[in-house]
Image: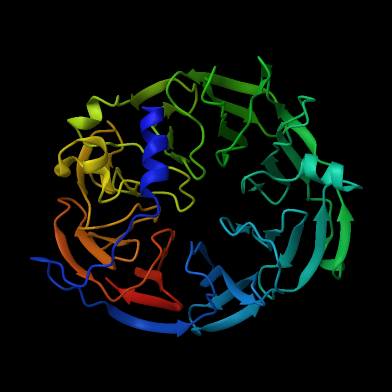
Amino acid sequence: MRKLFILLFFSLIFVSCKNNVVSNIPEYIPDIQWSMKINRGILGAMICEVSDDNLYFYESKIIDGCSLYRLVCVDLNLRSYKWQSEFYSKLCEDKILLTDNYVFIDTEASLECYDKESGKLYCSLVFGNNPEEINKNRPYNCTTINYKEKYLLWSTWNDNKINDEGIVRINISNIDFKSMNKETLVVNPELVWIGIDIDDQDEHVYTWPIIKDGVIYFQTYRSWNNYKSKFVAVDIESGSVKWIYESEEMLGKGCNALFVQNDRLYSMEYEIGCYDLSTGKPIWEHHQTEDDLRKEICLGGLIYNYAGIFFYDNCIYYTTNEGSSTAATFGCDESLCTNIKCINATTGKHIWSYMPKDCGSLSTRPIVVDNKVFVLTMFDGLWVFNRKSGKVLGCDLNVMSGGMDNNAVWNGQVIYFDNNILTVIKP
């Protein structure tokens, strides 16, 4: 199974072909409420977040062959820019960390703290007094998460062979950010949980942790060899481990793979699973062998998916890295190859799935509004489905996307990026 997904990723992730005609599929004409041009220098992932009628996302531009990035805030009511950060040469574009009052931007060397409402830059949080300390302590793989404006927590992965990697935290409740003016503040993270070292294979946290009711939940990653992934629940204040579940099949390299719904913890990555939030015991785990995948639809395969999933009415909607050449590559029937999927959250069972003709691999997040599922594909337009049956309601081939966006919902409207056009439509 793991070998299959490695081949799947490297052989299909860049495969796509723009369709000009889609047979027997009705044209979907978006009911555009408004749109605005943005600065999108690179047609890559567009990660956005909605908070208090504001939309936050990264813009980019290329100057003299160098890519520069900034965070911007758009007032969705006024339909215009509210503020823009300065440009940076390095940004972890795959996540925007919003708290009640602040926005934190990860530049790899520091966390830049901006006022959420005005966009004023308060300070740069630096995690050590020298490059070695900063590299050892810095957040890994966009894992930074906020807890009640009191702590910022993240995973570290420094490969220094000292076994000091794990989940760390800094206390921001006693920092008066608003009194600062572009200052540099050195903070030293403290370990909340430390991984173990077995046979020279360190235990890392690659997947983004999540928080609920004072507990941080995360999944560890081990190398392909000698591997076992752990699901761990740790009390944020005390650092005490509430439970650990070890999985033989789950990998722990799904980026934005974890989410909590009611009393269940879900992991959506190479394999998919559901766990009791209070004990960690599996409610279901769905494993498929290579033989299975030649006769049934693959339910895992969310490889390096930063955009995440969409939960609606006890259903999980997501996209995967299968593409149009999967069937020929692995010798299965074309009907089994899909990259837009819907499963039952209670059982993990397949409900419906689909793949547009000649579609490349996807890592975009579907959006569900008004019993419709909206999916931006990789250069194959905007597709709209009936959320229950999966019936194609139509497609708009004029929409241009890289198929790696998390999109958004605001006031019952769908927000997406059509190349360099921010678009808001009514379902």
Left or right relative to 52: residue 348 = left
> Residue reaching furthest top?
199
Q: Indicate the quadrant where residue 331 lies.
A: top left
Q: Classify residue 186 as left or right of residue 417.
A: right
Q: Nearer the viewer, residue 258 or 138?
A: 138
Q: Is residue 132 above or below residue 29?
A: above
Its colouring scheme is rainbow
- Across and down, in percent, residue 380 comes to 28, 65
| Residue lying at 38% horizontally and 60% vertically, measured from the top left | 403
- Residue at 72% x, 53% y is 108
Where is 181 relative to 361, above or below? Answer: below
Give coordinates of residue 247: x percent, y percent: 47, 20
Residue 74 in the image, given as x and y percentages of width and height: 55, 77
Note whether residue 302 is visible.
Answer: no
Residue 198 placement (x, y as % from top left): 65, 15
Residue 342 appears in the picture as rendered: yes
Most distant residue in the left direction: 24
In the drawing, does residue 34 fall left or right of residue 342? right
Q: Residue at x 21, y 68 (%)?
A: 395
Residue 269 location, quadrant:
top left
Compared with 7, 324 (above or below) is: below
